Image (cartoon, rainbow, N blue to C red):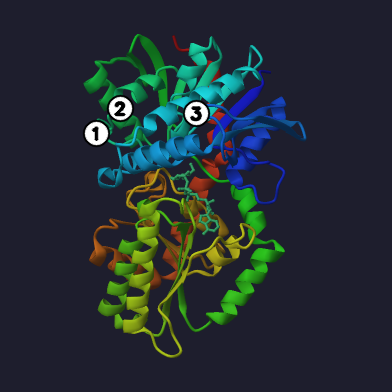
Amino acid sequence: MSRLVVVSNRVADPRKATAGGLAVALGEALKATGGLWFGWSGSIVEGGAPGEGELHVQHAGSVTLATVDLSVEDHAGYYLGYSNGVLWPVFHYRLDLARFDGGHINAYRRVNQLFARKLMTLLKPDDIIWVHDYHLIPLAAELRALGSTHRIGFFLHIPLPPQLLLAAIPQHEWLMRALFSYDLVGFQSEVDLLHFSHYVHAEASAESLGQNRFRAFDRTVQAGAFPIGIDVDEFAALTHGKEASDMYERMKEEYSRRKLLLGVERLDYSKGLPQRLRAFQTLLKKYPENLRSATLIQIASPSREDMGTYTDLLQELESLCGAINGNFGELDWMPIRFIHRNVARRRLPGLYRVARVALVTPLRDGMNLVAKEFIAAQDPADPGVLVLSRFAGAADQLKEALLVNPYDTDGTADAIQRALNMSLEERQSRHQKLLKTIREQDVHWWRQTFLKTLAETRSA
Ligand code: ADQ
């Protein structure tokens, strides 16, 4: 069996309790082949030379973890400047937030070259390489330039935008050409795949070879949609663990007289948080029976705090929460609890389980795993209701959620009201179907389907 090599911006030790479902799932595949996981170490070296970084290799059981440090300049250009200042906003349809100037592309390319150089020294001839996400789009092209003939797959965790939005990136052609250095390119949903197909036809006169194979830039690539899932069994086990149970009991008691609504995410402008708070405000105005009763716990963990757009968003949210609590709150009831912190992974399922309604309302999201975790954590006998944005990749699969347009404040408020008042019978029937879906297409299914397709694909 070929060895699996996973490459991603950050690397996780799959043995650690803090590792999320994705790290565990990839770790499983890596363990099976005595694999290698390669990425950035997380260290930013003062005075380090651009394009250089020390390689660290450590062993986590049968898995090798190899990481590279970045210089201050490379981190600023590759990570903050290009990956999160250009690709993240544009891929989430936010041209208004993208900063195209600043020459960050040079650092982005330089770090991908650095990773390719370091990785080449660790590769064996028949390794299969799986590259993850927007930070590393040109990695295969850089590996090929160094002589790699490995089978290489790429998975994009975030959405791929429509052709004309992509075309706003000055280097769009270079980026999309780079995807043709992979053997297989995977997206989260059929819509992303469609955008890829439109782009390559319109901008690169691609030829369709059938079954999502495309020929352009003198190369052939196989593309596909592989919706990522969660480890449902692992999450169910966490739900019944001590920390989640303690959390559940404590919250149940504390909120026994309230209807609890829950939002959980990284603080990010793609997640639609201001829109969600306004919809909640409309719910209180339009359906006053929720006053003194409905409580929204919004957890937004700190993320990319060294970027200005994120600080602005935090201020906007704090001021919105202040206004809503000030206008509607009572001495014994605050409508919103806004928590700008991480919740320990082991406790999270207890929160999901105690909530009557989860609000997962991103403006755009590749998939959104919180929606799936919420379903997995529910008590099938008395499940909560998922209010889900139609613009999350997960909406393609989770048809029995209450799907909303997060830009439509009134419509979202109506859906929340419907969720709060849904009969037990309807909640059970919807939950049963949702649980079946996330079980059938869980993270193991995702990984196996992608790797099987990659093993069968050879592009030229
Ligand atoms: P993210 O944008 O990070 O991921 P998501 O899919 O929801 O979004 O995954 C977040 C993970 O972090 C979940 O496992 C969740 O439990 C955890 N998490 C989020 N907020 C937390 C908090 N406050 N405290 C503790 N844990 C928290 C990107 C893409 C998504 C895609 C995933 C996977 O943006 O669209 O689904 O990758 O491909």
Residue 111 got which mark? 3
What residue lies at 36% left-to-right and 76% top-to-bottom?
A: 322
Where does the image place residue 308, in percent across and percent down from the top left? Answer: 37, 53
Q: In the rendered image, which residue does mark 2 sit on? A: 172
Question: Tag 1: residue type?
Answer: Ala
Determine whether label 1 and label 2 are within 8 Å by CB: yes
Q: Quadrant of residue 169?
A: top left
Badge 1 is on which residue? 168
SS of the residue under disc 3: helix
Q: N-terminal of the two: label 3 or label 1?
A: 3
Q: Is residue 293 visible?
A: yes
Can you tell which of label 3 and label 1 is closer to the viewer? Answer: 3
Cα separation, mark 3 vs mark 2, equals 18 Å
Q: State the image coordinates of residue 183 (x, y, percent, origin top left).
A: 47, 17
Q: Residue at x 25, y 36 (%)?
A: 165
Ligand 1 within 8 Å of disc 2? The answer is no
Q: Position of residue 330 (x, y in %)?
A: 40, 88
